[in-house]
Amino acid sequence: MALQLKKVKSSLSPGWYFMQGDEAAAEGAIAAGCRFYAGYPITPSSEVMVHMVKRLAEVNGVFIQMEDEIGSIGALIGASWAGAKVLTATAGPGISLMTEGIGYAVITETPCVIIDVQRAGPSTGQATRPGQGDVMQVKWGAHGDNEIVALAPWSVQEMYELTIKAFNFAERFRVPAFLLADEGVGHLRETLVIHEEVEIFDRLKKRGEPPFGTEDPTGVPPMPAFGEGENLLITGSTHDERGFRKTADPGTHAKLTERLVRKVRDYKNEVIQTESYFMEDAEFGVVSFGFTARAAIQAVKTLRKEGLKVGMLRLVSIWPFADEAVAEMGRKCKAIYVPEMNRGQIAGEIRKYTSQPIIPIPKTNGEVFEPAEIVEAIRRNMI
Amino acid sequence: MNEKIYQMINQQVFPSAFCPGCGHGILMNAILRAIAELEMEMKDMLFVSGIGCAAWIPSPHFKADTLHTLHGRAIAYATGAKLYNPKLKVMIVSGDGDLSAIGGNHLIHAARRNMDMTVVCANNGIYGMTGGQVASTTPLGSRTSTTPKGNQEPPFDLCKLVEAAGGTFVARQPVVTPIPLTRTLKKAIVHKGFSFVDVLSPCPTQFGRRNAFRTPYDMLTYLKNTCVSVEKAKSTAPDEIKGKILVGEFVGGKGGEA
């Protein structure tokens, strides 16, 4: 099953807008067909929620501010099974609380979109400052194996567009999908261009079909909703394709957990998206994502002017990881430099796919990168 | 009526997972009887439960939409489903530990919002499934696997808690009087707003054997002798109701729609 998208009219009138990143993400959600939001206030994501209150009222959607993030993800899952496309927005501390629900959404195959506007951690850290330290948290926060989708916008335009994509992937794969934003891009104000149409994906329904299993070990089953007479049996315990608990049967557990992974991993190329800059003759590589990539591309251009053959790969999708793209960079380049607002989370991931030297350029002082810092760090660490 | 109730159950899940002497079977019967007597359809219902023995009452037993959630989270999940599809008749069935300890925050906030849903708390005063640990509802002095010398923490009065939080129908009934229990459940189901029924259900396996109840029958007899209706309590001398458990409809019961 490939991603079969349908074209619908944009919810905003086509044209140019000057908008904040968080608000653009909310607009993307409305355009994708999101009609339910549950959330809890947290900096730097609260603007998403405030904008959703206003917009959901205009499109006859439902909004609730829950008592905490545990309640928010719970309400999201309940509403998703009632048939809604659902959204919440939070930051790292909120993801920490939502993590049990994220695991539940994985095993029950509940589509939901979670916007993580990353701030400087760990813990409460610096609430108003940017960070990119939730890369591993969204992937591995929940116990057990989790295949989820995460996309990392670098502009207000992508806050809008990748939110729509996150909904499409959530519904296509029946998984939690993250917009892994950061304070830099979330609070940024710049131009947003709205086109006539957007492409969206609606979850598949098939009366009487089992909602938790397919003949295909990589398949995504259709998803009915409450109140459709399907006697839905939904549980976070290991279950067969009809939802009956099989908590001591090795075969059922193996079949379920393998499919939960393979339904995403086997189709990862539908999700993986990267952008290459100056890679044709590159001898040195830079891998970057999110707001940091804006400084990184400037740094690459500066070094190019000095005659250094540097190229860059921007990760638009983070999970599933762009393994082949970074391996290819490893084959071309003598070394790979990885600026990120954490202590080397993506750098560590790249090491899995290439044996070339990986040089992390970490920054965790709660400030965004200046291009000059990246230029300096690359010059200092020439191989 | 019995045949109708039988049709509301997933036959393939028997034998039931409940221990001999467990009160949850009586509660399961009372819930289904209440729905059948109200002539409501199971297809219009959504049952949401958390984790623990009581959560198994609807899931997998009930032939209806059921959502077996995480420990403590049933009410939060139910809130989302009900808000998006208000036509669903939502009932939460879970245990005292699930609803009032790990899930206590969701309980009081749903009551505060007066969410239109029915919460049935199967209250056995202990964590049964995990081996009889003390709960936020365990009576003072009771022995559990984590209070071998007796519980020293006072328990919640869940009805007072929910009333204070804003619940608009609040009641308590023991499983030993199934007819009043069914009557109260019917009122709770038709109540518009947040209804809460604290159902006292014996756990002979984990509670009884540690607390000098030799048989399940002893626990049932104890419950029967200890529960006093709010009406009766009014005309009884305070000394005589000391140590008794008040049962009945505390909030929203009089002149109810049922």
Image: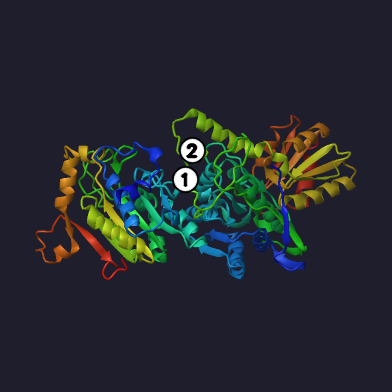
* Residue in the image at 56% along x and 60% along y: A37
Residue A135 appears anywhere in the view: yes
Q: How many marks?
A: 2
**Quadrant location of residue A182?**
bottom right
**Dot 2: few (<14), some (14–19), or many (≥20) neighbours within 10 Å?**
many
Do the residues marked 1 and 2 share a common chain?
yes
* Lower sequence index among marks 1 and 2: 1
Which residue is denoted by mark 1 in the rendering?
Answer: A233
* Residue in the image at 49% along x and 58% along y: B80
Task: Please tell me the numbered disc located at residue A239.
Answer: 2
Residue A193 higher or lower than B61, as above or below = below
Residue A56 higher or lower than A170, as above or below = below
Looking at the figure, which quarter contains the C terminus of chain B? bottom left
Residue A166 higher or lower than A106, as above or below = below
**Quadrant location of residue A323?**
top right
> Disc 2 sits on a residue from what chain?
A
Callout 1: helix, strand or loop?
Answer: strand
Residue B198 placement (x, y as % from top left): 29, 55
- The type of residue carrying mark 2 is His
Callout 2: helix, strand or loop?
Answer: loop
Task: Please tell me the numbered disc located at residue A353.
Answer: none
Is the residue under label 2 in contact with that under label 1 (CB below 8 Å)? Answer: yes
- The type of residue carrying mark 1 is Leu
